[in-house]
Image: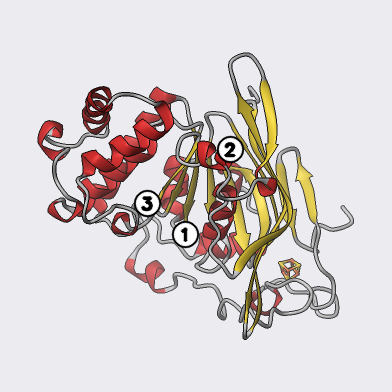
């Protein structure tokens, strides 16, 4: 299999939130790579650190959060060579970080209304990004916006460009946000649950759109979701996160057909499958217990109170390390430590 060039290397990333109640280790040693042109799925339950990882890459973690350790190495291609920049070392408001954010690494959020301005037209907001990063004239930028709205399948782009976000349906707003994110042709698009708030038909259209745009523009996508069905459709490689750590990473087929971590197996058992009978459906498994209190994480493996294969005296005492169980397939579980 052809190995694509590295685009982003996340190494031992730690982003903590310092609150009066205690410290939340939202991302606690996350490690993974994103390669040029690939789609990496990041999956896990709410609160597992997926979105904070994305915000750490963009250097937009809100206070009292802070990236306190690790590296985010961005392989930045300029005309004839590649520079490697550690994004954790760039001040969030520095010129260099602002040039990367939005233009080279862009993000689509779950709820477009949180990132689209209610008082500016869709066109003005996308034009602003284009003028800022590409230094074009107003007229050229307007032409580019109409092209981009057309590309993302927006109906009547010449008219929509002058509309406000509240005049659009949920699916159209999401398309507008994708158009804004793609307007500067980023190398990496981070999509954080971009279809969760949409109905299934619009979700299917947006997923199809993102796949075809990826092929056309050759960008990488980091696709964050709790929906394994979307992961199966959209991604080539997957990282599974639990309480701020990557617990399994592999190619998508390996994760679905040969999962090794008990948490990944439990996640897979908790999704309904086509063809299941009503009787089977009654037995659809759920993951035992609750996500632990982030202020008081269990000792040892954080998953041990919920794990079917927990080894007493071992899993509640030792911190599992990541082990490569086969080429390209890594698992953080004491069942495999020492192998
Ligand atoms: Fe389960 Fe132990 Fe593996 Fe944790 S380390 S996932 S508790 S078997």
Label 2 crowd (10 A; few <14 / some 14-19 / many >=20): few
Quadrant of the rendered image containing residue 2? top right
Q: Secondary structure at mark 3?
A: loop
In percent of width and height, residue 39 lies at: 51, 38
- Find the distance from the CA under tag 3 to the CA under tag 1: 11 Å
How many marks can you see?
3
Q: Secondary structure at mark 2?
A: helix
Q: Which residue occupies 43% across, 56% down?
A: 227
Quadrant of the rendered image containing residue 20? bottom right
Label 1 crowd (10 A; few <14 / some 14-19 / many >=20): many
- Find the distance from the CA under tag 2 to the CA under tag 3: 27 Å
Task: Residue 96: give its label.
Answer: 2
> Measured along the vertical axis of the image, is residue 248 above or below residue 3?
below
Task: Residue 194: give its label.
Answer: 3
| Residue located beneath label 1 in the image | 226
- State the residue lying farthest toward the right: 338
């Amino acid at each position: 299999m052809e190995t694509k060039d590295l685009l982003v290397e996340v190494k031992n990333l730690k982003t903590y939130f310092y609150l009066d109640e205690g410290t939340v280790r939202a991302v606690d040693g996350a490690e993974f790579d994103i390669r040029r042109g690939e789609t990496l799925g990041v999956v896990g339950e709410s609160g597992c650190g997926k979105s904070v990882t994305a915000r750490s890459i963009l250097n937009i973690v809100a206070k009292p959060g802070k990236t306190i350790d690790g590296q985010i190495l961005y392989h930045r291609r300029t005309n004839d060579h590649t520079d490697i920049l550690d994004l954790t070392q760039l001040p969030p408001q520095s010129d260099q970080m602002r040039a990367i954010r939005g233009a080279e690494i862009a993000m689509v959020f779950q709820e477009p209304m949180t990132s689209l301005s209610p008082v500016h037209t869709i066109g003005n907001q996308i034009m602003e990004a284009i003028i800022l990063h590409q230094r074009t004239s107003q007229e050229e930028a307007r032409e580019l916006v109409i092209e981009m709205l057309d590309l993302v399948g927006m109906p009547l782009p010449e008219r929509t460009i002058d509309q406000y976000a509240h005049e659009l349906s949920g699916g159209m707003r999401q398309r507008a946000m994708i158009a804004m994110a793609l307007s500067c042709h980023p190398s990496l698009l981070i999509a954080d649950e971009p279809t969760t708030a949409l109905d299934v038909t619009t979700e299917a259209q947006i997923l199809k759109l993102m796949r075809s745009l990826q092929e056309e523009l050759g960008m990488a996508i980091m696709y964050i979701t709790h929906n394994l069905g979307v992961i199966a459709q959209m991604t080539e490689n997957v990282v599974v996160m639990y309480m701020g750590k990557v617990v399994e990473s592999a190619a998508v087929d390996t994760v679905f057909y040969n999962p090794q971590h008990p948490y990944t197996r439990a996640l897979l058992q908790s999704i309904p499958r086509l063809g299941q009978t009503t009787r089977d459906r009654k037995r659809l498994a759920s993951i035992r217990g609750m996500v632990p209190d982030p202020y008081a994480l269990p000792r040892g493996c954080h998953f041990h109170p919920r794990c079917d294969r927990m080894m007493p005296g071992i899993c509640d005492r030792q911190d599992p390390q990541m082990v490569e169980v086969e080429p390209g397939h890594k698992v953080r579980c004491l069942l495999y430590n020492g192998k």
